[in-house]
């Protein structure tokens, strides 16, 4: 395809071809590798080759092959216009010949046999630079009512007049539009429409839009109706001017009309392509819709190489729609048919990435191992895929597995010596990073230092490492170096490296994250004040950084860890973060922390206001239930012995308990507090009902009980202890003993205490029997 298109470009409009490039490119074309849409171009170029050699018979035959190979009506019309133009150019431009043909034309005036001489004479006049005479000749012939020409002959003459006048002139376009309005020969009108579509000027495009609107508004269907819709849909995707937007709605409506009303339309595959393109240009982009149209296009495409490309594009659409599982299916389909071809590596990387994103890590590892074994994918592509998998393994916590694969990969790469420098250094960085995360720093410092030395001694260039890669890797390796030094007890040296990053690379991401590294080390040695200050400094120096709100949030957490006396300061830091970054996703968590801190300093009224604001301002937040229960806790603390306020608390807790899809641990906690509020209100029997309801719901089904985390198990244990106390107060020791035994059986918190009380009850029961 490349050499075909290069040949076309070298020929240009035929006025001044680059024959050397044209011929050499044409000789390099392998026609059997061309798609059906490209074959007509090949035969057209072949005709030009024969024409240049003076073989008119072979030229005509090649042109006929070009027309026969056209697979749609519009494409055939397009190539007929090209062939017609080339035939006009090849007509001899000779005054003597012109005079001879004129005599013959005069002698045959009024007869049908005059038609070919009229065509040839007008063409010769045009080639001699006498376009006005040629146009006048055709007008005279057409106006001669005695001329015995059929409709096709007359329309062919009108088409020639349009060609002579030119589609870039007002008169020429009007002539072509008149032919389409009044014509009856579908083939000739199709050529005229293609000539109009190829006119190159904003005015010509505006005229064409108006003409199509006019034709499509007519009550009587035109023979070219399908082509009108298709052409208008294409034009709708092109803005009228720079300030305008494409009319996607019109493009899609016209294309859909073609699908609905013209199912046999010869360019139906182009319609699917157009609809897919329009969907991808929408805001927001409609990737799933585009994929559906591309699937229909693929199902109507017989060319295997085109099907591979379409499966790849469909996979891309699903990938961009974050539907990675479907993307995997189409990438696999494309790659299974593409093994060994030039695009194998590209499809391999897409497939592995989609498998990783879909969570199918085992499948991604198999894909990499199979590619490594088959040898159909380059080492560089395999290493890039390994990078993606290692990152995914790290994200899911499989650090050791990721580290083992990376170390094997690095050993193989050093043995082969064929690793791109930038990728090799990235893998060294990742291996060092994973080593630190697994708690193993042995040898890491040396590997990092060696990698930094390589970068410094390496010439920057396209064959080694780019300036941006060198800068990025240097800063990331320095950040690792600082962390390793601090972990190895060389905190001052580590701090010096952090300062080096900040001074030499202040605009880098590593410079921003250096404060996170510093804070992490300070926290690890219990210096929470220093950790807080480092994070506050990050937000001060880089106020526009994506890390700034996170830094302030964590600074407040470190402030909280300094002790109860610093809780008010932590509340103020959260306030600062909320005020500066009101749209950050951490806002909700920050407000929840503020409420919790206020409760811990016994400011329940202030905390309740915080929770109520969260409930009102974020009614659809997935953690709304946390704010709801926290607010209920505040209400319970403020209610004291007020029956009215306790009733409000009971109603609130009952409503929270009935919230659909409430996390199981949270539901147990709400149940306990609901029973507690009822008991405090003096409604002991109702409190007992709630305790029985909760305990039976979560203990009758063993699978439900096993879903509880430590938090849920804690609250369930408290419920059972309270229920046992109720039975003891009601002088029902057997029921109380059964409750204690359930605590033991489910190994809930307080198991030893429950075991002891069960044993005591059993002894008391035995004594009563003995008496």
Image (cartoon, rainbow, N blue to C red):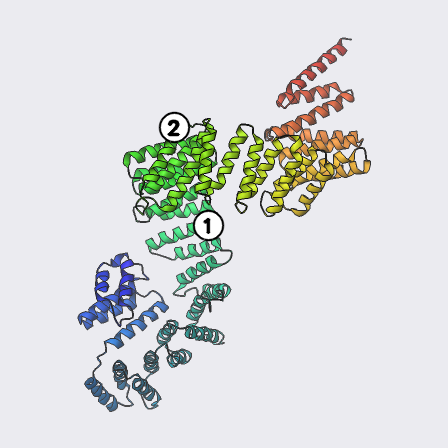
User: What is the count of numbered marks?
Assistant: 2
Residue 622 visible to the viewer = no
Q: Indicate the position of residue 640 as horizontal and vertical percent values.
A: 79, 33
Residues 360 and 742: in front is 360
Q: Nearer the viewer, mark 1 or mark 2?
A: 2
**Secondary structure type for disc 1:** helix
- The answer to whether residue 757 is above or below residue 539 is above
Badge number at residue 320: 1
**Secondary structure type for disc 2:** loop
- The answer to whether residue 702 is above or below residue 83 is above
Quarter of the picture containing the C terminus is top right
Residues 284 and 411: in front is 411
Check contact, mark 1 vs mark 2: CB within 8 A: no
Residues 766 and 752: in front is 752
Q: Indicate the position of residue 770 as horizontal and vertical percent values.
A: 76, 8
- The answer to whether residue 728 is above or below residue 222 is above
Q: Residue at x 29, y 90 (%)?
A: 110
Which residue is disc 2 drawn over? 443
Indicate the quadrant where residue 723 lies.
Answer: top right
Q: Indicate the position of residue 267 as horizontal and vertical percent values.
A: 39, 64
Q: Residue at x 77, y 32 (%)?
A: 678
Quarter of the picture containing the N terminus is bottom left
Q: Indicate the position of residue 26 as horizontal and vertical percent values.
A: 23, 62
> Of marks 1 and 2, which one's residue comes earlier in the chain?
1
Report the side of 562 relative to 251 (left or right).
Answer: right
Residues 28 and 395: in front is 395
């Amino acid at each position: 395809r490349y050499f075909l298109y290069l040949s076309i470009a070298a020929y240009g409009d035929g006025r001044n071809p680059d024959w050397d490039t044209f011929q050499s490119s044409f000789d390099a074309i392998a026609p059997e590798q061309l798609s059906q849409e490209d074959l007509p171009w090949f035969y057209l170029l072949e005709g030009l080759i024969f024409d240049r050699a003076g073989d008119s018979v072979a030229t005509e035959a090649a042109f006929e092959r070009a027309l026969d190979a056209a697979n749609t009506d519009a494409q055939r019309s397009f190539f007929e216009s090209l062939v017609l133009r080339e035939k006009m150019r090849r007509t001899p431009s000779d005054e003597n010949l012109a005079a001879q043909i004129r005599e013959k034309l005069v002698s045959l005036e009024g007869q049908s046999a005059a038609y070919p001489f009229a065509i040839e004479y007008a063409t010769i006049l045009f080639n001699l630079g006498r376009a006005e005479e040629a146009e006048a000749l055709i007008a005279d012939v057409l106006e001669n009512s005695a001329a015995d020409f059929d409709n096709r002959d007359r329309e062919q003459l009108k088409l020639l007049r349009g060609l002579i006048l030119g589609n870039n002139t007002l008169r020429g376009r009007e002539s072509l539009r008149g032919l389409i309005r009044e014509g009856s020969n579908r083939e000739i009108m199709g050529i005229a429409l293609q000539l109009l579509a190829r006119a190159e000027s904003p005015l010509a495009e505006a005229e064409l839009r108006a003409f199509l609107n006019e034709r499509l508004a007519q009550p009587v269907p035109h023979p070219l109706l399908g082509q009108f819709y298709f052409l208008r849909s294409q034009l709708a995707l092109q803005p009228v001017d720079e300030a305008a937007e494409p009319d996607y709605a019109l493009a899609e409506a016209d294309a859909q009309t073609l699908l609905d009303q013209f199912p046999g339309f010869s360019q139906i595959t182009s319609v699917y392509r157009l609809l897919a393109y329009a969907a991808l240009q929408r805001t927001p982009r409609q990737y799933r819709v585009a994929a559906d149209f591309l699937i229909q296009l693929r199902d109507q495409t017989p060319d295997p190489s085109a099907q591979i490309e379409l499966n790849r594009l469909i996979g891309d659409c699903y990938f961009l729609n974050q539907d990675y599982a479907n993307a995997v299916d189409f990438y696999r389909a494309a790659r299974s048919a593409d093994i060994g071809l030039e695009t194998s590596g590209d499809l391999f990387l897409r497939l592995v990435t989609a498998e990783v994103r879909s969570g199918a890590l085992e499948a991604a590892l198999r894909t990499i191992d199979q590619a490594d074994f088959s040898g159909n994918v380059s080492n560089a592509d395999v290493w890039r895929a390994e990078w993606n998998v290692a990152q995914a393994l790290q994200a899911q916590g499989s650090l050791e597995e990721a580290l083992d694969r990376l170390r094997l990969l690095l050993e193989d790469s050093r043995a082969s010596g064929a690793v791109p420098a930038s990728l090799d250094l990235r893998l060294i960085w990742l291996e060092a990073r994973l080593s630190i995360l697994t708690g193993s720093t042995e040898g890491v410092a040396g590997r990092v230092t060696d990698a930094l030395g390589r970068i410094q001694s390496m010439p920057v260039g396209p064959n080694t490492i780019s300036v941006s890669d060198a800068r990025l890797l240097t800063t990331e390796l320095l950040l690792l170096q600082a962390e390793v030094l601090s972990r190895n007890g060389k905190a001052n040296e580590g701090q010096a490296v952090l300062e080096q990053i900040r001074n030499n690379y202040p605009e880098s991401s590593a410079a921003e994250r250096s404060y996170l590294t510093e804070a992490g080390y300070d926290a690890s040695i219990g210096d929470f004040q220093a950790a807080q200050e480092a994070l506050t400094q990050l937000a001060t120096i880089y106020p526009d950084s994506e890390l700034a709100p996170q830094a302030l949030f964590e600074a407040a957490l470190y402030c909280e860890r300094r002790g109860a006396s610093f809780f008010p300061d932590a509340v103020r830091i959260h306030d600062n973060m909320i005020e500066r970054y009101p749209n950050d996703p951490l806002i909700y968590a920050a407000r929840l922390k503020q409420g919790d801190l206020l409760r811990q300093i016994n400011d329940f009224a202030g905390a309740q206001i915080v929770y109520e604001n969260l409930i009102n301002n974020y009614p659809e937040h997935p953690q709304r239930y946390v704010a709801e229960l926290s607010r209920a806790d505040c209400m319970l603390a403020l209610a004291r012995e007020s029956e009215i306020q306790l009733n409000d608390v009971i109603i609130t807790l009952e409503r929270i308990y009935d919230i659909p899809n409430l996390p199981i641990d949270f539901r147990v906690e709400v149940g306990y507090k609901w029973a507690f509020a009822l008991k405090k209100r003096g409604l002991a029997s109702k409190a007992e009902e709630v305790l029985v309801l909760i305990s039976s719901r979560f203990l009758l089904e063993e699978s439900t009980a096993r879903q509880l985390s430590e938090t849920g198990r804690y609250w369930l244990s408290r419920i059972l202890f309270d229920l046992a106390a109720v039975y003891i107060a009601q002088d029902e020791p057997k029921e109380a003993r059964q409750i204690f035994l359930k605590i033991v059986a489910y190994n809930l918190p307080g198991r030893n205490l429950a075991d002891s009380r069960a044993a005591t009850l059993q002894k008391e029961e035995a004594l009563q029997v003995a008496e």
